[in-house]
Image (cartoon, rainbow, N blue to C red):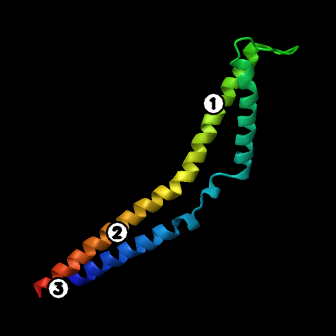
Amino acid sequence: MKSTVVLGVIGFGILLLILSALWNALFPATTKWTPEKAARAAEVKGKLHNLAFIVNSPRPNLQAGQDLGQLKAEYDALRKENQQLDAEFSSAAETPHTVSKVLKWSGISLAAIGIIGWYAINQQR
């Protein structure tokens, strides 16, 4: 009975190690970060870059029909959207690696506990 539990723990630890190795292939970051989001992020960054020179300039060079207050509001909205897109990208890129690390170290821990238990059972005989 004891040896069955110990072998189960070792087997489960090895299964977690294998799953951690395959996790990035099974659940890639591209499932959360789509090409549409990437295109939108590039568009937002481009607009931010262009507006930054106008909004942050000590002497803005406004063309006819442009209002500095309206450009500042658009700049602030784009900065907020850019921060949100950056957070989504970071989450999509880092989540598979984080889960893989947790699975790997959980598997190593369970396998080590199982091996120690197996050794202890064999010493009692």
Say which residue label 2 marks.
Answer: 108
Please tell me whether residue 17 is drawn above or below residue 32 in the rendered image: below
Residue 1 visible (yes or no) = no
Callout 3, which amino acid?
Answer: Asn
Labels 1 and 3 touching (C-beta < 8 A): no
The residues tagged by marks 2 and 3 sit, at their Cα atoms, a distance apart of 21 Å
Residue at image coords 11%, 84%: 124
Callout 1, which amino acid?
Answer: Lys
Where residue 95 sits in the image (x, y, percent)? 51, 53
Mark 2 falls on what kind of element? helix
Residue at image coords 55%, 48%: 91
Labels 2 and 3 touching (C-beta < 8 A): no
Callout 2, which amino acid?
Answer: Ile
Say which residue label 1 marks.
Answer: 80
Mark 1 falls on what kind of element? helix
Mark 3 falls on what kind of element? helix
Pick the residue in front: 6 or 83.
Answer: 83
Which of the two discs, 1 and 3, labels the residue nearer the N terminus? 1
Q: Quadrant of the C terminus?
A: bottom left
- The quarter of the displayed image where residue 102 is located: bottom left
Where residue 20 sits in the image (x, y, percent)? 46, 67
Residue 122's mark?
3
Where residue 17 sits in the image (x, y, percent)? 42, 71
Which of the two discs, 2 and 3, labels the residue nearer the N terminus? 2
Which of the two discs, 2 and 1, labels the residue nearer the N terminus? 1
Please tell me whether residue 6 is drawn above or below residue 60 in the rendered image: below
Q: Is residue 104 left or right of residue 96?
A: left
Where residue 92 sits in the image (x, y, percent)? 58, 51
Labels 2 and 1 touching (C-beta < 8 A): no
Residue 4 visible (yes or no) = yes
How packed mark 3 is, by other alpha carbons closer than 10 Å (few <14, some 14-19, many 20 or more), is few
Pick the residue in front: 7 or 76.
Answer: 76
